[in-house]
Image (cartoon, rainbow, N blue to C red):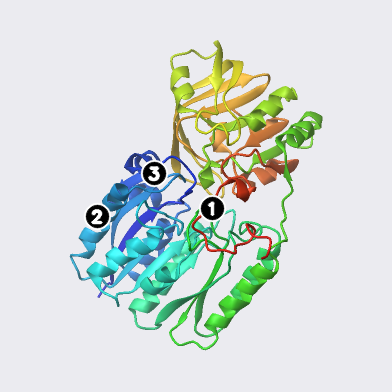
Amino acid sequence: MANRVLTAEISHETNTFSIRPTDLQDFKDRCFLDGPAAIAQRGGDANTELAGVLDIGRIYDWEITHTISASAGPGGRVTDAALDVLCAPLLSAAAQGGWDGIFLILHGAMVVASYDDGEAEILRRLRAVVGPDLPIAVTLDPHANVSAAMCDLAQILVSFTTYPHVDIRTTGQRTAELLQQTMAGDIHPITLRAHRPMLEEANGGRTDIGPMVARHAMARQFETQEGIFAVSINGAFPNADIAIVGPTVLVTAEAGHDGAQAMAETIADDIWERRAEALNTYLSVGQAAEMAAAWKTGAGPLVIADYADNPGAGAYGDSTALLSALLAADVGEACFGPMIDPKIAHQLQSETVGNRVTLDLGGKTAPEFGGGPIKVTGTVQWLGEGVFIGSGPILGGQRRSYGDTAVLRVQGIDILIVSIAHQILDLQQFETFGIEPQNLRVVALKSMQHFRAAFAPIAGRIIVCDSGALCTLDYATLGYRAVPRPMHPLDVSV
């Protein structure tokens, strides 16, 4: 008889320093789908965990009931009311009983108004309905802050192995395979955890170069051993002022395996011992603009990533520091995006393409983080609803929307002005709106690492800068209070 599997997707990465709480509308702006709609939009050829689960479900003839797919852009704490709404369809379906297993697609760094460990709270509510023994498998983003409670409440927890995250679908597949083996009684997994007192791994979990390459090779070698089913390395999400912040190594193994905890500790020790080995050199916005002004055409664009104003980590996305520096340096043949300024994006919808306008752009949320509004004069290049469909390694096949969107050309820089926050992950986030990054001299974007999957192939060079926005590397400016101390790098003693 076919296994009956209950699935749900509830995902958020919470920046507790953001003054903007994440409410239900924020989920509706990004992704808020019932089961059938989610399968239609996030199944098929999409690079999603859900598509991977559906792949395995077809092989084993599972009866899958998918209840919800909901995600919001990174931001402040999720409201209690939003969490209740997100959990309701999952808990209602769970209460019907008759399930052989549950598959949850989570992030691992959700913080809720009343619960610092959002994922553990979802799992607690679920366990209260289904009991302690039903197999639960969970996929995680490797920027998860994984708690011991999460490992106690779910037998299987597996994270992506890549950053940029290009193995999302395959992570869904291999996690679903483990759930199948568990439901069949072939394995009896538990997940063990090792944690170190750091805000994050030295390079945020970057896997294209650096020490994480060897760590993942070690993890894959561990997985060849009998009874070791998955080894997950989580670089952590540092912009969360909570007790469980920090990098973790998870080993999903047969219950009672003698060496599983030692494997987790071995990799965690390496993360700790190499805590000072940062790969990136973070330039000031002035240094980045100086390099941009001198960049020659013909070698591919100079790509400048504003690490600190990354909407993908909960920054406001309206920092003006880098744009101001580029304009002051008279950097032309360039693009910049996104500038998240809903007021201006909406205001521009009443204009006509070709009009010249003067306006105060950006810097409206918290000017102390990355600069206040700047007055610019430019020509409107594009107007409309900012819907795009990804074509690259991360967003391939996925539909997203910026809401009201405009492109304004100022001193030879095409500025993408949007209403709904998204970090830059895909070339289509520019190309859909008439901007061709590969044909420009300079591409300035707001992202940390994910952009590399799509932009590294066209770039002549990539540099990163810290604009002083909310995701600045100057952690001392953020005012951590809840994290345990001592904590690297907040305390010089560790």
Question: In the image, what residue type sits under mark 2?
Answer: Pro
Q: Amino acid at mark 3?
A: Thr
- Label 1 sits on residue: 480
Residue located 31% across and 66% down the image = 124
Around disc 1, counting alpha carbons within 10 Å, would you say few (fewer than 14), some (14 to 19), or many (20 or more)?
some
Q: Residue at 59% across / 49% down in the picture?
A: 450
Q: Amino acid at mark 1?
A: Tyr
Q: Say above or below: 344 vs 167.
A: above
Residue appearing at x 54%, y 27% in the figure: 362
Picture coordinates of residue 455, whole percent (x, y): 65, 43
Label 2 sits on residue: 89
Of the numbered discs in the image, which one, if any, rests on residue 200?
none
Asked if one can make out residue 56 in the rendered structure from this viewpoint, the answer is: yes
| Distance (Cα) linking label 1 and label 2 | 35 Å
Whole-angstrom CA distance, mark 3 to mark 1, is 20 Å
Classify 270 as above or below 18.
Answer: below
Residue 208 in the image: x percent, y percent? Answer: 67, 57
x and y percentages locating residue 323 in the rendered image: 65, 28
Whole-Å distance between the Cαs marked 3 and 2? Answer: 19 Å
In terms of sequence position, does the residue under pointer 1 or pointer 2 come before the other?
2
Q: Image check: 28 left or right of 456?
A: left
Residue 5 vs residue 120, the one in the foreground: 120
Name the residue located 46 percent from the left edge and 51 percent from the top edge: 13
Q: Which structural element holds mark 1?
A: loop
Q: Residues within 10 Å of mark 2 (few under 14, many from 20)?
A: some
The dot on residue 22 is 3
